[in-house]
Amino acid sequence: MNIIFHINFPSPVLAILARLEAHGHEAWAVGGCVRDALLGHAVHDWDLCTSATPDEMLHAFSGWAVRETGLRHGTLTVMLEGAGYEVTTYRVDGAYTDGRRPDTVCFTHSLQEDLARRDLTINAMALHPQAGLVDPFEGVSDLQHKIIRCVGTPALRFAEDELRILRALRFASTLNFSMDPSTADAIHAQCATHALRHTAPERLLAELLALLPGSGVLNVLLEYPDVLAQFIPEIRATVGFDQHNPYHVYSVWEHIAHAVAAAPPEAEIRLALLLHDIAKPVCFSQDVAGNGHFYGHAQRGKAMATQILQRLHCPGDLTDATARLIGWHDTPLQADPAVVRRWLNRAGEQQFRRLICMHRCDALAKTPSLCAERLGQLDLVECLLNTLLAERACFCLKDLAVNGRDVMAAGIPRGPQVGAALNHLLDAVLDGRLPNERQRLLKELHFHTENSFPL
């Protein structure tokens, strides 16, 4: 992997470093911004560290716009050019008795001591526009070899802050790196003793949503189901579960992992695929020939996924979108205009496209030789969807060529019957029995009104 050592520091960062140095203090860019800059990735947040104490920082930045965001722990935010830049005093963490945060923080004048408290080698580097790179734990080597490795003793790092386990998986997924063997062993050992029990559900969900879109997600899911099962215990039953079905070359968990990896990096789709077959073990049955079946697993999975996401304090809109996709994922999709219009009415364009994608990923994670026809059919469904949308096809009430005023003008009194009449017309258009043309729809209204037929 090519590492970029000629880094262009933003002017506000240069100004902050120069200000601190003008007052006799050391100052460096540190952590994730250094990692991303070396990889040639866009840097969104520049974090800086300094030998200056909090009081010395306040003195150095006197007259500047600052926010005392965490001054007790040595952090303030300097506001320059409309953005905030966190500056933190070198520090050493005390004991971690709660498995998440240090009980105490001690300031130090040693950059190396500050770097030594960090989680991963690729996050424990410091960079200066003139002094260059400080890399005491061979983070550059790990970037070059695509390795995720803890600083120091992995078991100690994870015991200090259990969320580091998920962070390690997140970086392995997003960077498509391999886990150092000793780090991997420590992760599995920690999970054998009920890791992640001290971490807030929101933090667990945030890390999960960050790792799922990664290009290395397949290996992470296949190698670390024990980690995810710490906060989604329903996963355990899927691991190694033989589906006893010719369409499935993988166990349930392997199928899930391959389906997730086949998807575009969109949270709703990958989250839905992660949970789409979560109910298969509890819905399993075999026929007389020994073939496995999972009757009702989509609806059961929808209910289970809703419970899982609510436990993780997932936002309601994401929970709802994910659960709906899971509930629909086992429903066949047909390349028929009426069927596609019905799906557009039921799900809307965005969710229907997600559903088509989900069906495709589900098929790609099955026995390849048996799924080619299914993939071809999904291509036809998507092509038909694009055609109907290009033709501005009607699939909801607001698209109808008539409205409530037209219905009342046809002699139907104000009230529930107006809505019933509009829905009758919409059903006819969705099914293809009527075109979405104003005069044809008005004729249908007058016909039913004059003949007193119920709508």
Image (cartoon, helix red, strand yellow):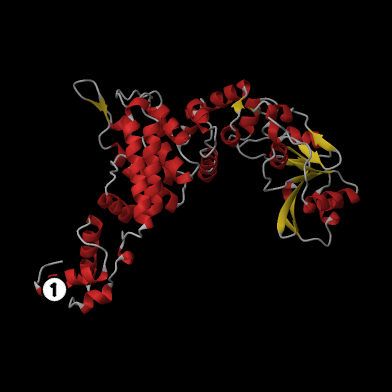
146 above or below 39? above
Q: Residues within 10 Å of mark 1 (few under 14, many from 20)?
A: some
Total marks drawn?
Answer: 1
Q: Is residue 331 left or right of residue 445?
A: right
Quadrant position of residue 379: top left
Q: What x and y, as percent, mark residue 90?
A: 78, 41
Q: Is residue 50 left or right of residue 101?
A: right
- What residue does disc 1 label? 449
Q: Is 321 positioned to the left or the right of 39 in the image?
A: left
Q: Position of residue 288 (x, y in %)?
A: 18, 21
Q: Amino acid at mark 1?
A: Thr
Closer to the camera in the image, 98 or 48: 48
Q: SS class of the residue under badge 1?
A: helix
The image position of residue 13, as x and y in percent, is: 78, 50
- Residue at the image point whose x is 77% and y is 31% from the top: 135
Vertical order, 418 against 161 (above or below): below
Q: Quadrant of the N terminus?
A: top right
> Which residue is nearer to you in this view: 58 or 305?
305
Residue 388 appears in which quarter of the rendering?
bottom left
**Residue that protrudes farthest toward the left in the picture:** 451
Viewer-side residue, 391 vs 395? 391
Residue 118 in view in this figure: no
